[in-house]
Amino acid sequence: MFGLEFDQIFFVLIAAVTLGFSVLVVTMRNLFHAALALMVAFLGVAVTYVTLGAGFLAMAQLLVYIGAISILIIFGIMMTRRIMSAEEEPFNGQAGLAAFTAVIFFAFTTYVFINYWPAVPAVSPLAMAPEVDPAMIDNSVVLLGQAFVNPNAYVLPFEVASVMLLAALVGSVFIAKPRIQEAEA
Amino acid sequence: MDIMELLKSLLELDLGGYLQSVGTAVWVINLIGVLNLATACMIIVIFLIWLERKVIARMQDRIGPNRVGGKYGLLQSVADATKLLSKELITPAGVDRIPYNVAPVLIVVASLLTWAVIPLAPGVIGVDLNIAVFFVLAISSVSVVTFLLAGWGSNNKYALLGAFRAVAQMVSYEVPMIVSLLVPILLARSMSTVDIVEAQGIPFIVVVPLSALIFFISALAETGRTPFDLLEADSEIVAGFHIEYSGMKFAMFFLAEFLGTLFMSAFFVVIYLSGYRFFGVEELMIGGLHIGALLGFIVFVVKVFLVYFVFIWIRATLPRVRIDQLLNFNWKFLVPLSLVLLLTVAVMDKLFLADAAQIPKAAVLMVTNIVVGWVTVELLRRRDNDGQTAVSPITEEAVTAH
Amino acid sequence: MLDNWQFIAIFVLFAPLIPGAAIGANWLLSPKKPNRIKQETYECGVEAVGSSWIQFKVQYYIYALVFVVFDIEAVFLFPIAAAYGLLGAFAVVEIVLFVLILVAALAYTWGDGSLEWV
């Protein structure tokens, strides 16, 4: 069909689903439905990872984004006082500014990918990942594990990640604290 | 000769290998594998419901199902399923249609999918992923979402409250489960379930008994079984998140619960009880026929049912805990304990046991596990005796729930 | 690797047919006599009052938050555990440090009283 491989059709399909549900996330008026649409968008990204041979990343996407972040978002929605079933206006005065920022960010990342990312061939926007040795993909999790603790690779980001998690937790608990005391009173 | 080859492949549980040798396409073989696996799961669950009712009845000095299908009531579940088929599907007014109808389907899909990575016998596995354990965790976290879908979609306060409790319980107990699973992965040096089974010359329940215990307790909570069956605490939230479902839609939640419990038994067997291995019986060859595959499968099934029996036994023995006890027990006992255990095993393994032989290493790790567990229990006891705020949920003062 | 995922893909496509068939058969066989009383939201003997989508307490959020932290921790630790045989002794120090920082996070929420169920 149009000279496309099965892989490419599949990719376009998944990308369309992901983008479609992303649009729904920002346009739906019921916040719970928006959160559900967000989950489907996350799922689409996970499927894309699988087609690229990054199974570990795909499962991490499921575990962290669908299993944890989405639930956090839904709990957040349920905590707010009136939003629950109220139909919120999805656009406010900052919509234009947000769109502008998004376009700038997209242009910037595209520029970086095309010019500074050697692994991505800038031949066609539909170009699939270059052929990789299958043994390397099977072993990728172990390589990843080694890279995390290798002083010449990612040990600093690895440790900083845990500090960042600590900071995020302390910060959120600090913000939530007055609500807990309010609930106790 | 072809028939002989086919019979041989069936006896060796290697139908896929035979089909491949006659040139069947890979996706057809995969489809047949999926059909086998899913059908087997369904049939076993029907049997399982009967088994559970019978065993519980016996433990409570009752007879249990004894009318339908002969003296032992073997067809009771079939009769129940048929009855449910003829029940009206009542959809309450004001439900949120999409989440309400997706939830019962999705929960069954999630509990079926995890079976893909369980090695049932030597060489018999849906798919040997190199991230199998991680896959299981990811899929179970999707099933958590279905509770929210059902609870929200039902337009019922009890359902939503039940769903929130269920999710809080699931996500909480996922933490000790993940951390305790890291220990066997660390010892097996792999996330593949096949590699983990192959690494268990000595079953991990002997090597790291504390990790196995933490996993088992978390598994009880993850599947919502007694004493952690707060998701459907009838006296508090009626039936929990599936209160507004009737007929087959309700049966799907029931089915998923049994599938989930059976899966947790199988997963426990694979991770801690060396799966299909039993003193080398799984490698037995008789006259060129790999009969060990069949024996390994029988060994696996027997082990799974033994673990499942313990699940039933606990259900018949323990009363339900309160929600504050449940969450305190997790965050203030299981999580810290599992983290301490993980660090201890990691340090011991690398610094002291890097070159040790298998048996001394296992012995040292087992003693370490027992010491960690004993010290924890001793510390808790001291603390209780000092009259301070107890960490143990059993002795904690009742705080008002809700 | 992709062949492995083919099995999962077929499974994902096939699995919904089982609950779908069961519910579909039920829908075909069952009586369909809805009425207003039958379709009311369940409540213990009285009529349900107000919206069911009510506000929830903040504790649920805190538990989910702590869970996110440990979930992300797991994503980091799983590959390290799988590669453990190939790591040097220095890696142990890094892992211990990593986990201890997270234990500090847990200790903070614990000491803060945020883990209490009120």
Image (cartoon, rainbow, N blue to C red):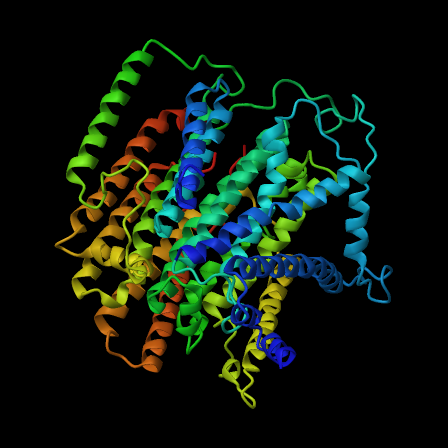
Image quadrant in which the N terminus of chain C is located = bottom left
Residue B305 occupies quadrant = bottom right
> Residue placed farthest to the left in the image?
A152
Nearer the observer, B265 or A123? A123
Q: Up-down: is A42 above or below A54?
A: above
Q: Look at the image and tell me whether residue B324 can be seen.
A: no
Q: How many marks?
A: 0
Q: Up-down: is A113 above or below C53?
A: below
- Horizontal and vertical percent position of residue C22: 71, 45
- Horizontal and vertical percent position of residue A150: 17, 57
Q: Look at the image and tell me whether residue B244 can be seen.
A: yes
Which residue is rendered at x = 78% and y = 55% of the image? Answer: B78
Nearer the observer, B283 or C117? B283
Nearer the observer, B392 or B162? B162
Which residue is rendered at x = 33% and y = 13% of the image? Answer: A95
Residue B98 occupies quadrant = top right
Q: Up-down: is B244 above or below B382?
A: above
Which residue is rendered at x = 36% and y = 53% of the image? Answer: B336
- Horizontal and vertical percent position of residue C111: 33, 41
> Residue placed farthest to the top in the image?
A93
Lateral position of residue B335 relative to residue A129, left or right = right
- Horizontal and vertical percent position of residue B93: 70, 23
Q: Up-down: is B209 above or below C110?
A: below
Nearer the observer, B320 or A24? A24
